[in-house]
């Protein structure tokens, strides 16, 4: 079997097979891949996206190899902490595997296995490290069978565990990877409730329940502090369990908490998560949905009274059509995606935040975010309506026109002036280009009903 031309189906994901080195394969026999002769051809648009991925990845290799991120304008690198944790390679690896970039993936696995160490005296953000690194290591392990990635994931999981040692069981925001010292009692639902897919998968793959149990308890503790009308706020103290900001919304700081209620049910068959999702979505649709400003939007309300606080919506909120579609609510998903698209097309590319009652920009940056593209992919998958690939062409056009640089892609500091910012976040390769690729690739490239993407677009599969 040879590179791009040979495919295997890994319980729902079609990937090339050349990277499945037998010596490093440690998946149980029941989850070993079955060879498929039905090789899907990516098609011209997907190939163009793959070209944009390579343009960005090659720039990372040239200017930032071994570091966390490429800085595209200065053609240099940026590390999050005093020691690099290979954020971009770990985040980008499963995209390479899914795009069939076998040689790149093999070199990247070797880089990670040889150079990534978590034995560092650095204080890291638990949420970001979990969704990007733990999620990336686990999904790439499942796709490649490379046992070195699972070893790294387990090592990282053990170093993150101290975050849960708070009086409520809800995690602190920061932990020192070497000493286990924690900090940051003031947290939010997203940072508390976006851990179960990764920690739970680690439990299933290692046979050690501790990771699942700790992350599940955090989720349940958070849910149990919802208001009488079923909403959560924006900030909570994990030591006292008291809310310190009662503003409720589906935006950054809360967003992926809801996503993980739904997806933890789907990935683990966890009926508690099913119940928590089902009661939460009723409250979200009752108090946060807003149809009074042309189309469907979701704004902000007080978690206790349900009173509307503001009509803000932004690039991060645009993940919600994907979640609605995955839950089966195609009607709301379609309507909300039209609103997100209006936000994108008003400026040629989307701002971080608008007021949907006036369509005025509240926060002008575009940080190469994936959410609107993720939602287009889910809707395209479930409805087969060409409308969403048309949206995808608009997104690709805007990205190439406004964000492409000689060395990768750059965020924008202002979508109205189209001024660039010297930053290419690792999620651009993990999420933005992955979802864009999948949107244009043949539908059978991935069986969305058998795969659960974590919030950083790392595909997880039930191999247990
Ligand atoms: C990513 O790290 C994740 O998608 C997270 O849930 C939200 N922010 C970025 C992308 O915008």
Image: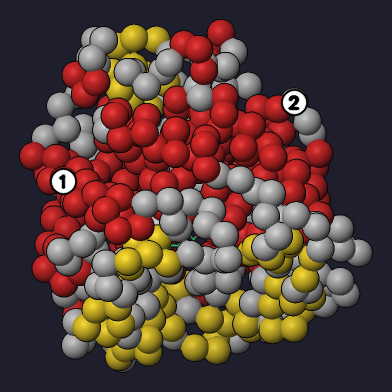
In the rendering, at what x and y percent does residue 3 appear?
24, 20
Establish whether ligand 1 lies closer than 8 Å to the Cβ of label 1: no
Identify which residue is drawn at 19% across, 88% down. Answer: 417
Q: Quadrant of residue 208?
A: top right
Q: Is residue 201 left or right of residue 14?
A: right
Tell me the SS state at disc 2.
loop
Q: Is residue 394 visible?
A: no
In the rendering, at what x and y percent does residue 287 appear?
56, 74
Identify which residue is drawn at 31% across, 46% down. Answer: 434
Quarter holding the C terminus is: top right
Q: Is residue 423 left or right of residue 135?
A: left
Q: Is residue 24 visible?
A: yes
As displayed, is residue 200 above or below residue 230? above
Tell me the CA gap for discs 1 and 2.
39 Å
State which tag comes first along the sequence, 1 or 2.
Answer: 1
As displayed, is residue 363 above or below residue 21? below
In the rendering, at what x and y percent does residue 75 appear?
26, 67
Q: Badge 1, how many Cα within 10 Å: few under 14, some, many 20+?
A: few
* Residue highlighted by disc 1: 51
In the rendering, at what x and y percent does residue 198 appear?
62, 43
Question: Which numbered tag is attached to residue 207?
Answer: 2
Choose between 270 and 399: the one closer to the eye: 399
């Amino acid at each position: 079997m040879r590179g791009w031309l040979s495919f295997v189906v890994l319980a729902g994901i079609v990937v090339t097979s050349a990277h499945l080195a037998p010596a490093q394969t440690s998946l149980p026999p029941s989850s070993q891949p079955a060879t498929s002769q039905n090789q899907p051809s990516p098609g011209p648009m997907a190939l163009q996206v793959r070209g944009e991925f390579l343009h960005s990845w090659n720039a990372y290799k040239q200017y930032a190899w071994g570091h966390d991120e490429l800085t595209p304008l200065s053609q240099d690198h940026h590390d999050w902490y005093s020691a690099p944790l290979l954020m971009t390679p770990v985040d980008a690896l499963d995209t390479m595997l899914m795009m069939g970039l076998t040689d790149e993936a093999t070199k990247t696995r070797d880089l990670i296995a040889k150079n990534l160490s978590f034995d560092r005296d650095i204080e890291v953000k638990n949420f970001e490290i979990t969704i990007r690194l733990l999620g990336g290591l686990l999904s790439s392990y499942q796709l490649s069978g490379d046992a070195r990635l699972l070893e790294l994931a387990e090592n990282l999981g053990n170093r993150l565990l101290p975050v849960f040692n708070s009086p409520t069981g809800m995690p602190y925001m920061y932990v020192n990877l070497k000493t286990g010292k924690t900090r940051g009692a003031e947290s939010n639902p997203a940072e508390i409730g976006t851990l179960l897919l990764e920690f739970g998968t680690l439990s299933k793959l290692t046979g050690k329940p501790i990771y699942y149990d700790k992350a599940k308890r955090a989720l349940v503790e958070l849910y149990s502090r919802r208001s009488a009308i079923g909403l959560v706020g924006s900030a909570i103290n994990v030591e006292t369990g008291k809310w310190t900001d009662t503003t409720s919304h589906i935006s950054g700081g809360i967003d992926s908490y809801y996503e993980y209620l739904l997806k933890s049910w789907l990935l683990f068959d966890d009926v508690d998560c099913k119940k928590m999702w089902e009661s939460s979505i009723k409250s979200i649709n009752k108090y946060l949905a807003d149809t009074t400003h042309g189309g469907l939007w979701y704004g902000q309300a007080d978690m206790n009274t349900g009173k509307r606080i503001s009509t803000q919506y932004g690039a991060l909120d645009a993940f919600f059509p994907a979640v609605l579609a995955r839950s089966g609510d195609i009607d709301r998903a379609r309507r909300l995606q039209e609103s997100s698209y209006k936000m994108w097309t008003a400026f040629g590319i989307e701002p971080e935040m608008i007021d949907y009652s006036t369509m005025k920009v509240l926060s002008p940056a575009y940080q190469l975010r994936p959410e609107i593209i993720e939602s287009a992919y889910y809707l395209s998958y479930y409805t087969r309506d060409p409308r969403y690939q048309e949206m995808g062409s608009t997104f690709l056009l805007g990205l190439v026109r406004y964000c492409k640089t000689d060395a990768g892609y750059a965020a924008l500091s202002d979508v109205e002036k189209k001024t660039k910012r010297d930053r290419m976040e690792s999620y651009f390769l993990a999420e933005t280009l992955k979802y864009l690729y999948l949107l244009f690739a043949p539908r059978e490239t991935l069986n969305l009903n058998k795969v659960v993407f974590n919030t950083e677009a790392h595909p997880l599969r039930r191999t247990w």
